[in-house]
Protein backbone atom coordinates (compact mmCIF):
# COMPACT_ATOMS: atom_id res chain seq x y z
CA UNK A 1 0.00 0.00 0.00
CA UNK A 2 1.34 3.40 -0.96
CA UNK A 3 1.44 5.98 1.79
CA UNK A 4 0.83 9.62 0.96
CA UNK A 5 3.78 11.72 2.04
CA UNK A 6 2.89 15.29 2.95
CA UNK A 7 5.54 17.96 2.61
CA UNK A 8 5.41 18.53 6.38
CA UNK A 9 5.99 14.83 7.11
CA UNK A 10 8.86 14.67 4.61
CA UNK A 11 10.46 17.81 6.08
CA UNK A 12 10.15 16.55 9.64
CA UNK A 13 11.50 13.13 8.69
CA UNK A 14 14.49 14.72 6.96
CA UNK A 15 15.17 16.95 9.97
CA UNK A 16 15.09 13.94 12.28
CA UNK A 17 17.34 11.91 9.96
CA UNK A 18 19.85 14.74 9.54
CA UNK A 19 20.03 15.38 13.28
CA UNK A 20 20.39 11.66 14.04
CA UNK A 21 23.24 11.32 11.57
CA UNK A 22 24.98 14.48 12.82
CA UNK A 23 24.93 12.98 16.29
CA UNK A 24 26.47 9.73 15.08
CA UNK A 25 23.51 7.41 15.58
CA UNK A 26 22.91 4.44 13.30
CA UNK A 27 19.23 4.14 12.39
CA UNK A 28 18.67 0.86 14.23
CA UNK A 29 20.45 1.99 17.41
CA UNK A 30 18.55 5.27 17.42
CA UNK A 31 15.19 3.56 16.93
CA UNK A 32 16.01 1.33 19.89
CA UNK A 33 17.00 4.35 22.02
CA UNK A 34 13.71 6.06 21.12
CA UNK A 35 11.84 2.84 21.95
CA UNK A 36 10.46 2.51 18.40
CA UNK A 37 10.45 -0.37 15.95
CA UNK A 38 13.24 0.13 13.38
CA UNK A 39 11.01 -0.30 10.36
CA UNK A 40 8.44 2.15 11.76
CA UNK A 41 11.23 4.60 12.52
CA UNK A 42 12.59 4.27 8.97
CA UNK A 43 9.13 5.12 7.61
CA UNK A 44 9.06 8.21 9.84
CA UNK A 45 12.37 9.37 8.34
CA UNK A 46 10.90 8.86 4.86
CA UNK A 47 7.88 10.98 5.80
CA UNK A 48 5.42 8.13 5.42
CA UNK A 49 3.57 8.70 8.71
CA UNK A 50 1.78 11.54 10.38
CA UNK A 51 3.30 10.78 13.78
CA UNK A 52 1.63 11.34 17.13
CA UNK A 53 2.74 13.91 19.65
CA UNK A 54 3.89 11.06 21.90
CA UNK A 55 6.15 9.69 19.16
CA UNK A 56 7.50 13.15 18.41
CA UNK A 57 8.35 13.59 22.09
CA UNK A 58 10.18 10.23 22.14
CA UNK A 59 12.23 11.23 19.11
CA UNK A 60 13.04 14.67 20.48
CA UNK A 61 14.09 13.23 23.84
CA UNK A 62 16.36 10.66 22.18
CA UNK A 63 17.95 13.51 20.18
CA UNK A 64 18.26 15.55 23.41
CA UNK A 65 16.26 18.44 22.01
CA UNK A 66 12.74 19.81 22.16
CA UNK A 67 9.95 19.11 19.72
CA UNK A 68 9.93 22.80 18.81
CA UNK A 69 13.62 22.58 17.87
CA UNK A 70 12.79 19.67 15.56
CA UNK A 71 10.00 21.68 13.96
CA UNK A 72 12.36 24.62 13.52
CA UNK A 73 14.96 22.39 11.83
CA UNK A 74 12.19 21.11 9.55
CA UNK A 75 11.15 24.65 8.68
CA UNK A 76 7.69 24.13 10.15
Image (tube, rainbow, N blue to C red):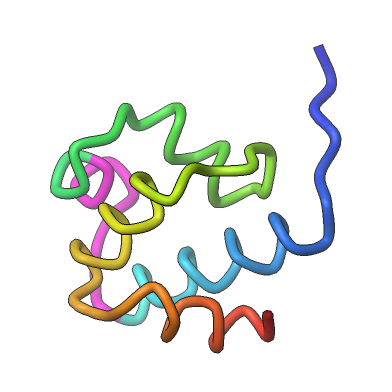
- Determine the residue positioned at 27% across, 41% down: 28
The image quarter in which residue 40 lies: top left
- Determine the residue positioned at 63% across, 38% down: 49
Q: Residue furthest front?
A: 53
Q: Is residue 57 magenta?
A: no
Viewer-closest of 16 and 23: 16
Q: Residue furthest top?
A: 1
Tell me the quadrant of the picture where the N terminus can be found.
top right
Task: Indicate the position of residue 30 as horizontal and vertical percent values.
Answer: 24, 52
Task: Indicate the position of residue 57 as horizontal and vertical percent values.
Answer: 31, 58
Tell me the quadrant of the picture where the C terminus can be found.
bottom right
Chain part drawn in magenta: 23-31
Task: Indicate the position of residue 56 as horizontal and vertical percent values.
Answer: 40, 55
Task: Indicate the position of residue 50 as horizontal and vertical percent values.
Answer: 64, 42
Q: Residue furthest left?
A: 33
Viewer-closest of 71 and 40: 71
Q: Is residue 27 magenta?
A: yes
Q: Is residue 61 left or right of residue 60?
A: left
Q: Is residue 6 above or below residue 1?
A: below
Q: Is residue 54 left or right of residue 68?
A: left
- Determine the residue positioned at 20% across, 65% down: 61
Amino acid sequence: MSRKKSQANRSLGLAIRTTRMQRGWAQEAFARAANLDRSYYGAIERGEFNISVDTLMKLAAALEMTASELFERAGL
